[in-house]
Amino acid sequence: MSRVSASDYRVNQAIRAPRVRLIGPNGENWGIVSREEALRKARELDLDLVEVAPSANPPVCRVMDFGKFLYQQKRGGRGQPRTKTEVKELRLRPRTSEHDRNIKIRKARGWLEDGKKVRIRVQFRGREITYPELVLSDLKVIAEQLSDVAKVEAPPKLEGRSMIMMLAPLGQRKRPRKNPAS
């Protein structure tokens, strides 16, 4: 990752363009104004004028606290780090027995209770694909069985030789992890 420094940006008097597209401190577009007008507005708010897109025509400048901006850039982004929701996949076949399917549903329930999304994929082979409505009804039954912990995010749809349905957890409650050390 490259380091961010003050020399990477033109600030206040260092901006050379005669006209700039001005963005306010809250992200609102203030239109195209002269450089002097933009500097005056920044001074009125006791903030800096920073050129954020020098290659644009006209260059884009933003009214902001430059010190705070540099700190956030060095820290690595805005606000809290994003947590990526993990997607688990459950693979079935059209002829999977009811007992095996129930075991897989129990596993999916655990993932959903952990706050993970679950993709249920039913893989067709040979002539099994000639009756997709049977699999569709099975997927609806599975969704109904898991309706207390999940909602259907993407309804069942045929993609190539498989039918896929996506389930998302209802709440963000995560069950406590079992501690293997104790």
Image (spheres, grey):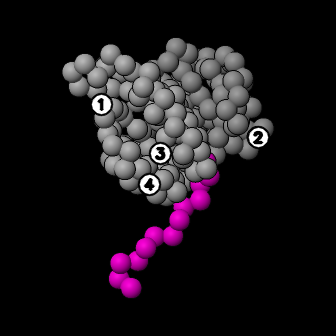
Image position, residue 31 (x, y; %): 69, 18
* Of pointers 1 and 4, the one earlier in the residue sequence: 4
Residue assigned mark 4:
106
Is the residue 104 above or below the residue 131 in the image?
below
Q: Residue at x 48, y 53 (%)?
A: 109
Quarter of the image with the C terminus in it: bottom left
Q: Dot 4: within a 10 Å radius of its alpha carbon, few (fewer than 14), some, or many (20 or more) residues?
A: some
* Residue 27 left/right relative to 97: right
Q: In the image, which is nearer the foreground, mark 1 or mark 2?
A: 1
Residue assigned mark 3:
117
Image position, residue 50 (x, y; %): 57, 35
Q: Dot 1: within a 10 Å radius of its alpha carbon, few (fewer than 14), some, or many (20 or more) residues?
A: some
Q: In the image, which is nearer the foreground, mark 2 or mark 3?
A: 3
Q: Which residues are magenta?
A: 170-182
Q: Amino acid at mark 4?
A: Arg
Q: Are marks 1 and 3 in contact (CB under 8 Å)?
A: no
Residue assigned mark 2:
45
- Residue 123's disc number: 1
Q: Residue at x 35, y 78 (%)?
A: 180
